[in-house]
Amino acid sequence: MKGRVIVLGSAIAAAFAFSIWLNKPDLDLEPLAPATLESPTLEQVKAGEYLVQIGNCVACHTDQGGAAFAGGRAVPTPFGEVYSSNLTSDDETGLGRWTNQDFYRAMRHGRSKDDRWLSPAFPYTSYTNLKREDSDAMFAWLQTLAPIKRVQTPDTLRFPYGTQLATRAWRALYFKPATTADIAAMDRGRYLVEGLGHCAACHSARGALGGLRSNTSYMGGEIASLGWDALPLAPTQVPSKPMTDSEAKELGQLLKTGINTDKAVAGPMSEVVFHSLQHLKDDDLAAIVATLRALPMADAPPVARVPQVSPEQRQSLRARGKLVYAEHCADCHGDAGEGRANVYPALAGNANVNAVSASNALNLTLNGGFPPSTAGNPFPYGMPPFSQSLSRPDVAAVLTYIRSEWGNDAPAVSVVEVERR
Amino acid sequence: MNPMRRRNRLTRWLAVPALLLTLLALPAGAAEPAELMGKRLAACAACHGDEGRTVGEDYYPSIAGKPAGYLYNQLLNFREGRRQHTIMAGLLAHLSDAYLGEIALYYAARPHASQPPMTGATPEQLALGERLTVLGDLERKIPPCQACHGEQLTGVVPMIPGLRGLPARYLDAQVGAWKNGVRHAREPDCMGKIARALKPEEITAVSAWLASQAYALDAKPLDSLPNTMPMDCGVLP
């Protein structure tokens, strides 16, 4: 009898503790000011359009070939696909019946108008840092979008990841809602980087359950399910050298135009520059660069295990790679990997080339790519796809060569790793 | 209705003539120097050859000399997913409409390839292919190819592509993709209707016959068609 009481008592206590834990982030939520129903001013609407660009909302909330902001793009996650929602002003399927309070609650608290807990594929872990007036401006602009009827595509998350209970548990583990005081303490650069810009969504590594290891470490790492790595934004190597003024200027140019003296953006970052960063006003760009420049040291990003290459194999890959490089790469990237300013990125000292993971270099070599068209670089030079013209062993060879020449120092790439692509 | 919404609808309607103007403006001449464009488009040359000419290639089509409006439309289709090709979609994903227009103009102005005619099609295939190409099958509402693609099948500027000098496998795959609903054109999708009416062996025969014909180096797309087209096609202004 006594044993039963103890078991029952412990079960009740555990359930109680679990429920407290589950509700913890939501107990911390600040109440939000009620909806304002007056018509927005033209200034507000214009400011909102800019902020929506800076948040790069269009990229996820537009399906390929679909109407802008009508949603329906599949966002791949390790747990299945999440489909973006319709942000147009349609009453039935969009935000037509929402108020600016509903919208702010979604951004700040990750909770929908119908009280559903939103999937963290929507980066409210960053948007929680948004100011009310900015959220209201964004909402005011979104409401000017013509209503487009597009019924929500159901997510295809595996059980139990798609359940509301799983979402709440995820929140308990990983979501720390910002307070008004937190937001007020941020300068403009931090506000854009940690808030609307949601840089951490890709540039901070994620744990096994898709939570950011640390929202603000910016160590980079694999972008789940995209096959690309985000480069570290923070210094990760000891000793770290502070960014010089000219490096900071170059970084600003890269974010604004997609290209600079020795770098070009690629992969998912092209999308960010194309839709979002090229529209940055000069003072906001400067604020973002200043914030990135001051990021504290971060741990090196976790790296996926790849097949090992013996020293003999490495030597033969390097020898073959030198020939492949001279034939296929040197015309554009130069005999010493020096590239051409504002046209072809340098490979010597290139962060994508030198990353421990060869993912980005492999993607670019096999599939080619263009940096984005931007006002500052409207007709970019493209890299040919080599998946048809180079054999798998030649791709491994040329990457091994590039990753160990001209001061580069990254692990060799095995043929098996190329074949896995 | 909210006045901002109304304004947005207006911009949407204004966008339609703007698109037409872009297309009509296309053949007027590229703004970007050809030599620079050739270097920028090294990525395209990997499959489509130098200046867009593939010779002796068994799949990738030559794009040199095709009408600019057609090329522009295909670039948009690949970027927006109406035509499906992973590498093409990846390359074009973040290029602006203005750049795609420049690319179309550049390739339209290149001389087309001297493609050796295909050999190896059977006499039965060639006979069936020629009959369908030249006469169509009016009972099944299949018009002859010439009715839209020009008497010499060299296309019509700015929107209708020529059918000569292309690999049989490419032609076969494209019409097949239309038939299977993988490739689309703007509605009303005339090629979609024709492809669905054709049997697979007829598609192969027409592709084989087309690829077996010589393509004179001085042949050019027509400036206009002598007769009205037999079908409504959404791609035409």
Image: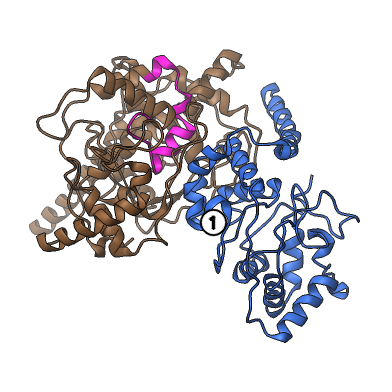
Chain colours: A brown, B blue
Indicate the quadrant where residue B220 lies.
Answer: bottom right
| Rendering coords of residue B95 (x, y %) | 52, 39
Q: For the residue carrying disc 1, how many other residues have a C-alpha within 10 Å: few (<14), some (14-19), or many (20+)?
A: many
Q: Nearer the viewer, residue B20 or A400?
A: A400
Q: In what quadrant of the picture does the C terminus of chain A appear?
A: bottom left
Whether residue B162 sits left or right of residue A27 in the image: it is right
Question: In the rendered image, is residue A53 in sight?
Answer: yes
Whether residue A23 sits left or right of residue A381 in the image: it is left
Q: Secondary structure at mark 1?
A: helix
| Rendering coords of residue A376 (x, y %) | 48, 26
Confirm whether the magenta stretch covers residue A381. Answer: no
| Rendering coords of residue B213 (x, y %) | 71, 71
| Image point (40%, 51%), residue name | A76
| Image point (8%, 56%), residue name | A2
Q: Name above or below for residue A116 compared with residue B12.
A: below
| Image point (54%, 24%), residue name | A49
Whether residue A89 sits left or right of residue A193 in the image: it is right
| Image point (83%, 68%), residue name | B144
Q: Name above or below for residue B28 compared with residue A137.
A: below
Confirm whether the magenta stretch covers residue A279. Answer: yes
| Rendering coords of residue B165 (x, y %) | 66, 64
Question: In the rendered image, is residue A30 in sight?
Answer: no
Q: In what quadrant of the picture does the N terminus of chain A appear?
A: bottom left
Q: Which residue is mark 1?
A: B48
Name the amino acid type tagged 1.
Answer: His
Q: Nearer the viewer, residue A179 or B91?
A: B91
Q: Give the magenta range.
A: A260-285
Whether residue B13 sits left or right of residue A363 in the image: it is right
Q: Nearer the viewer, residue A271 or A212?
A: A271
| Chain bearing mark 1 | B
Q: How many marks?
A: 1
